[in-house]
Image (tube, rainbow, N blue to C red):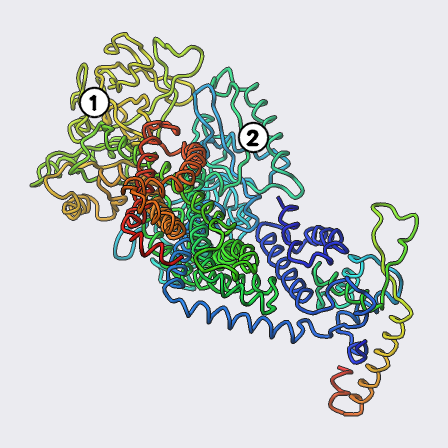
Amino acid sequence: MTTLLRRAVLLLYPRAFRRRHGAEVLEAMEEQAADPAYAGARGRLRYWRDILDDAVRAAWRLRTSRDGSTASLPARAANIHPFPTSPAGLELLMNDLRHAVRALVRRPGFTAAAVLILGIGIGGTSLIAGLVDGLVLRPFHYPDPDRLVTIGVTFPKMNADESFIEVLSPPEYLDISQAKSLEHVLAFDLGNRNLSGGDLPERVFTALVFGDPFQTIRMRPVLGRGFTREELSPGGGRVAIISYRLWQSRFGGDPGIVGRAIRINGIPTDVVGVMPPGLLLIGTDLWLPLTRDPRDWPREGRHFNVLARLADGASREQANAELAAIADRIAADYAARYPEYAGWRLSAVPWAEALTRPLRPAAALLALAVAFVLLIVCANVASLQIARLLGRRRELSIRVALGAGRLRLARELLIENLVLGLAGGAFGIAVAWAGLRVAVTYLPERVRMLDPDVGFDTNVLLMALAVSVAAAMLVGLIPALVAPRLGSSDALKAGTHHVSPASGAASLRQALVGLEVALALVLLVGAGLMARTMWQLAKIDPGVDTSHVLTMRLTLPREKYEGAAITAFFDRVLERLESSPGIAGAATASQYAPNVFFGTPVVVDSTGEGSSMPTSYVTVATPNLFRVLGIPIVKGRALTPADRQGTEPVAVVNESFARRFYGGLDAIGRRVGLPSGEGRTRWLQVVGVAADTRGRGMAEAPAPELYVPMDQDAGAWNQLFLLVRVEGAPHAYIPTVRRIVSELDPDQPVYAITTLEEAFSASVVQQQASAILLWAFAAIAVLLAGVGVYTVSAYVVGQRRQEIGIQMALGARDGDVVRLVLRQLAWILIAGMAVGLLGGLALGRVARGILVRTPPDDPLTIGAVTLLLAAIALAAGYLPARRATRIDPVAALRTE
Amino acid sequence: MNPSAQRNPSLIHLHILLVLAEGDRHGYGIKQEVERRTDGEVRLGPGTLYEAIQRLENAGWIEEARPPRGLDGRPRRHYRLTKQGWSVLEGEVARLRDLLNRAMALPRLRKAASA
């Protein structure tokens, strides 16, 4: 690829120069790439900027001053220009520029249309590129982001795919730290802490860390320092690092914050450092050191994330090889006690990539789609240009006859298009700039929480400029190639209307329209697949009644609430809520659809799953959860208030659980084992089967889930959700809930307030965004292709005016005339659609990751959009053909 | 022939001639040497470098030299100063020395040069 690019750059130079020095220049480009100044991703960008800058300047000088070629050495031997640009060259350029601007201003309609279309194409491309760049390719500011890796884990025994967030335990972190190819290995757990003192208690998203994060992410604190070894070892002091955002918002950017004590979960804690701007670890605002020895944590307590830097000189392959060996060693040592270790895998993946992996399918799809839009735009403007040239044939011929060089004509056109492209680019940049500001506000909360670096920055600007120039070249090259031939002298000999009807230019233009039709079909297939996906999503039953439910989260500090006190607190909150007017019911749960994430291996007394370990989501809840969310019980009973501490431990399973682990057998009365630390198992009796819910969001099929009564698991969870079913608009009840909580504990914050409906629509935001954008892209594409077909049809009618006139004089009917015109269009449409179908199938494969219940080659969708496009294209072709029937045969023949 | 141009090679050309005056070199070697001498102040991208070489060749001031023997790696095109190149360089140096002498006659500029 790189070599290809370099060769393309070489094409800028005059041929003679290329012959003599091409190989050397290529070599020099290669050698320059090895310069350490160009290391890293940004370095590569700089490299290409420098190379291009150098090549454009040198090639310009060579081409514009007369001694650039080696053609006749002796005659030009010493004609060396001391200055980089010869005055003659510059003057020529200014002339051309003036000429181009004049030509464009003379045709304001054409110019406005071209600038508008180009602007939409360039703006759309830059917008998507900016989003993809900011969200997926380099979302964070870490230095050397490619070498900051996280450790992913795969447990084939538990059917668990590679995952990165909260997947490792502290003892496993110690094992991983032994890898020599990794340095500054860091483990952190995500949690919430309450920050009190000041006006309002606030819950703060917190990372609890083993190790000094600043060394790993390789950034300096804005104020203060990182954690010291003492602070990180057992018995270390109570210290904290806060985010830049928290420093600004909560402490007003107080420069004396370091050394001050703040109250975290009610306990005074010294601030030792302030992080740089940006939320550097998954949106956390507070970093606290973990001082308990990692060895003392349970091996199966996998709720940590591991980050590390690749050691100097170590490659990711080396790190992965070492991790594989470590995984094998752990499996050999511990698989007897922890069967999930059998066959498990560890992998080092760049942190940004791991975090943004779920966004990649949509990103790839949209990037591809917008590139197609840009191509259509270019084809459209190019074909407009050709149409213009066809109209200017006589003028061109005259100029050629008067001695204007054909090369000069071509250069003029190229420059004219460059001006056009840059004007379109300027408009497009405005579109992208405005679009990005709007788009950022529509980012889903889950993504915005990561605080990615999305916005209109120099990179996007450079990208937009590059796209404009590329588009202008693409648009300009084609007419420039055609123009000299158009200027051939036979155009002069004949009457205006009589020059050879299908010259190269006309058929080139038809090919361009064919290309537009093809690309429009590709985009229509994408739009159709997304439409079907949205339709399928709308049909899916979420399994819960999403309307009128308000949800929020509470984290009770362990320092204040222990064991049964947690249950008691929530019981009181629920009691007061349920007696408030307008509230139909309230429940507490550790998680709820569509955000069910906590799962664990379970032991079932009859497993249909062979040797693999059954796993299930486990939700701790109060009995009225089923009533509040509207989850039907299909068999047995729901949980009841009678299921408390001291009575027989029970559980309700969902249908997927019953089906997967009990097959056709009755689930009621069976026993399920949950791990309860130190390898012990807690046994529960299944008393009911609940209907499935879309626990992982609408786009994912239901998975086994187990509901456990909160009273029988008292104190295990201090971070719980309140779910409140209300009458009317859920948001109206936020003050009520806040008041009730603060009456019970004024220091207790309530956060993550949302409605169940919002939570569900957030779970399909990728599909939604892709659908809307693809529909818009397809609409633009179809419109442009329609215009293309229309103009070609009109051209055909104009060309065959006399023939049509004769045929009509001979008695041809309207239908015959229309057929005559459409027949000539038919091959363009058929060829375009055939290519478009192939492209559509390819696009479907790219889209596969976000399609729901829709095969990527869904024949129904593809058939429907093909017919739709055919109908639109035929209609666009029909209009001029229809007008042809109104040609007056006498008038048409008179022009002869 | 354009005598005025011949007496006025550009700065880049002058640097290249100067490097070649000390011995034959291949293109990339010239670039590295020029950049090293000027502490990177004069940067020679691939295009600029060979454009200059081409012009100097066209002017007849440098020519292709036989690559030194016994060199490992690929054979590379080397360049050397021609007789004409030498005389241009000598002329240019003399011209610059004149310029410098004249500048040194002014006390203020003398201070700047010695600082």
Residue A134 vertical position relative to residue A294 in the rendered view, above or below: below
In the depicted structure, whether residue A531 falls above or below residue B4: above
Quarter of the image that includes the N terminus of chain A: top right
Label 2, residues with CA under 10 Å away: few <14, some 14-19, many ≥20:
some
The residue identified by callout 2 is A175
Residue in the picture at 89% in, 71% down? B84
Viewer-closest of A707 and A300:
A707
Residue drawn at (77%, 83%) of the image: B113
Residue A552 is left or right of residue A80, and the answer is left
Q: Residue furthest bottom?
A: B106
Task: Say how many tags the image has.
Answer: 2
Which residue position is annotated with label 1?
A644
Counting from the top left corner in percent of width and height, residue B46 is at: 71, 58
Disc 1 marks which amino acid? Arg
The spot of residue A383 in percent (x, y) is: 44, 53
The residue under the point 85% across, 68% down is: B61
Secondary structure found at label 1: loop
- Kindly tell me whether residue A268 is visible in this rendering: no
**Image quarter of the C terminus of chain A:** bottom left
Q: Nearer the viewer, mark 2 or mark 1?
A: 2
Type of amino acid at the residue the image marks with label 2 = Asp
